[in-house]
Structures are given as C-alpha cells and as structure tokens.
Image (spheres, grey):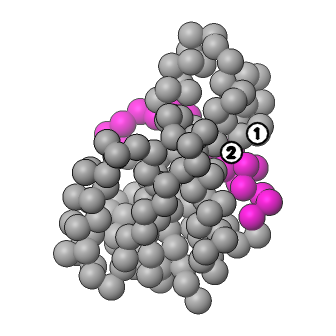
Amino acid sequence: MKIAIYPGSFDPITKGHLDVLETSAGIFDKVIIAVAKNSEKNGFLSIDERVNLIKASAKHLPNVEVDSFEGLTIEYAKKRGAQILIRGLRAVSDFEYEMQLSQTNSVLANEIQTVFLITKPENSFISSSTVREILLNKGDISKFVPLPVYEFLTNC
C-alpha cells in the first residue's frame, strides 16, 4: 500500500491545496494531509479549525485522512509508515526551497521519496497568506477557497 503524506500549515486550505490533494488521492492508495503545528507561530486559524475545514473540504476523497503533527515532517512520515511526501508547486519560485527541503529529507530518511505536484494554472497564484490578506480587507475570497472554508471564514 502506497501511503503519502501531504504536510503543510493550510492556514486556511485553498483551492490550490485541494487541487494537489485531489491529484494525490488519484495516485496513491492513502493520502494523509497533515497540518503542521508550529508552537513558535500564532496561526490565523487554530489547528482544530484547520483540521475540521480540511475534513469538510476533502470529504469527497475516501482515501484521504486528515491529521496534525508537531516536529519534523520526515519523522512523522516514518511513524505513519509513509513512503512518499507530497509537495505542491505553484510557480518556479517555489522550486528552489522545495528542492532544498526534499534533499534534506532524503539525507534524513532516504527511504521516503518526495513527489512534486504542480497545481492547475487557475490555482497557481493562490496562497493562504493572499487569502488571509483579502479576507482581512473585506474582499471576496470565494474564488480561492473551498466552500466549507468560505462559509466558515465569512461567518466568523
């Protein structure tokens, strides 16, 4: 069974994230979308809110599990028996950072491979920080986030 971990902060999950998740779910037997806890950062949404919004946004994907973790992603992947880490790429500018991260993870656990998936062009410019900025300035985020996220954020 091929298990993949799709880690990130997902603060909030966007249509770009969901695009990568849907592609991953079509490739791997099981995909665990894992919300990273960073005790040094104050998130826009709580970890529980992110997990719940991802569950609501991905309920159409039966082989997707939603979880959260703290610490190194590669250690979490080992604990979960994953063979693959999923990393989404929106633009060429993402590649250098993601390649460095992938190579570091390879040194830490060469049995776990990183797979890069590119979002569809219509999602290539969407980021969680852009969504937060639009929302905080009372703009319309409906084109950038899944419906459960839009409903939650506009009713807060």
Quick one: label 2, few (<14), some, or many (20+) residues within 10 Å? many
Where, quadrant-wise, is the C terminus in this rendering?
top right
Q: Is residue 48 magenta?
A: yes
Q: Residue at x 49, y 55 (%)?
A: 118
Amino acid on which the number 2 mark rests in the picture: Leu
Q: Which of 102 and 53 is in front in this view?
A: 102
Residue 91 shown left or right of residue 49 in the figure: left
Q: Name the residue under label 1.
A: 148
* Magenta span of residues: 39-61
Extreme-top residue of the structure? 137
Dot 1 or dot 2: first in sequence order is: 2
Question: Which secondary structure lies at badge 2?
Answer: helix
Q: Mark 2 points at which residue?
A: 53
Residue 115 shown left or right of residue 109 in the figure: right
Q: Do residues under tags 1 and 2 come within 8 Å of each other at their CB atoms?
A: yes
Extreme-bottom residue of the structure? 1
Q: Which residue is drawn at 58% across and 48% down?
A: 120
Question: Which secondary structure lies at badge 1?
Answer: helix
Q: Is residue 59 visible?
A: yes
Q: Can residue 46 be seen in this view?
A: no
Quick one: label 1, few (<14), some, or many (20+) residues within 10 Å? some
Could you say where residue 80 lies in the image, as x and y percent from the top left? Answer: 49, 78
Q: Residue at x 66, y 71 (%)?
A: 26
Where, quadrant-wise, is the N terminus in this rendering?
bottom right
Could you say where residue 55 lies in the image, as x and y percent from the top left? Answer: 71, 54
Q: Does the magenta stretch include residue 108?
A: no
Residue 21 shown left or right of residue 79 in the figure: right
Could you say where residue 110 lies in the image, as x and y percent from the top left? Answer: 27, 82
Height in image: 125 above or below 140? below
